[in-house]
Image (cartoon, rainbow, N blue to C red):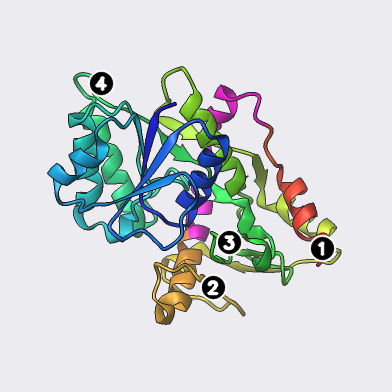
Amino acid sequence: MVKIAVAGFGEISREIIKAILAEGRHDVTVLSRQDAPRTILPGLSWVKVDYHDKTQLAQALRGVHTVLSFIVVMQDQGNIAQINLIDTCVAEGVKRFAPSEWSFYSVETFAMYHGKRDVRRYLEKLNEQNKVLEYCLFIPGVLMNYLGPPEKLGGNLSYTQLFLDFGNCRAILPAGSDATVTFTTIEDVARVVVGALDYSGEWPVMGGIAASRTTISDILQLGEKIRGKSFAIETVKLADLDANIFTTSWNPVTLHPTIPVDQRELAGREFMRLSLLSLTDGVWNISSEWNQLLPNLKFTTLEEFLQESWRDN
């Protein structure tokens, strides 16, 4: 049993915390800028911290073996919170660290994710001469759960509509591209993290998780098979995506709590634009390091997930 600190208490971190606690093998403490909610999961500890105060962070990390970061990079100006967290991990002898990733690897297209890139560079430089901190980028690709009905997302995930809309049997795609996309359920991501905590070897820097890797055309065929009708496909030329010109009849929406309500429509459209651009660059084709390191884990396939999710719809 070791002590785990989880920086941030957002949607993905809650699912992972729940899975770790369910195994009952580790002590888990949330580090948060906020006070603890009135009710928290049994066995979970909570410490309110100021990420700008390294002395306070040091007290919170004393005796901690592994830190999992879920700090929202878009809200971390200059990556100060996460870099202070990393520095304190080194100072306090934390063995393992997972930076705030939990999505796809290549982030150049997504300006809002450039903080992830900068933190990676900081970690690389940190270990340049001698390894002082073992770390892993957990990269699961697209959360499969977002392809299911919104009402089946579960208590911790908010609805984020993708360019593939299974509910209305429609899709918006970049013209002339049949890109490969990697999907993993949030439940399987959590199971991988649980397995990684108990993994006796050294963590890989690149920690790809790939439950299902498939092309857009195959996803659409699967969707039509499961939903029993053809999908209405709209395409957008790359030049129009670059110029932010849209003539599509619909745009994805996001209900993520970190995005103000009056900005969600615009945010959904911009995320779709960047997603379509990145599809053609292979950004959504994720490696599978953790699949190989944890061979006994059985992942939910895309077909299994969609069949179950849309069974009664």
Could you tell me which residue is drawn at 66 percent across and 52 percent down? 216
- Nearest to viewer (mark 2 / mark 3): 3
Q: Secondary structure at mark 3?
A: loop
Image quarter where the N terminus lies is top left
C-alpha gap between disc 2 and disc 4: 43 Å
Q: Which residue is mark 2?
A: 253
Q: Which residue appears farthest toward the bottom when viewing the image?
A: 262
Tell me if residue 200 can be seen.
yes
Mark 2 or 4, nearer chain start: 4
* Boundaries of the magenta span: 275-297
Mark sitting earlier along the chain (4/3): 4
Which one is closest to the eye, mark 2 or mark 4?
Answer: 4
Q: Amino acid at mark 4?
A: Lys
Observer-side mark, 4 or 3, equals 3
Q: Position of residue 304 (x, y in %)?
A: 77, 46
Q: Tag 1: residue type? A: Arg
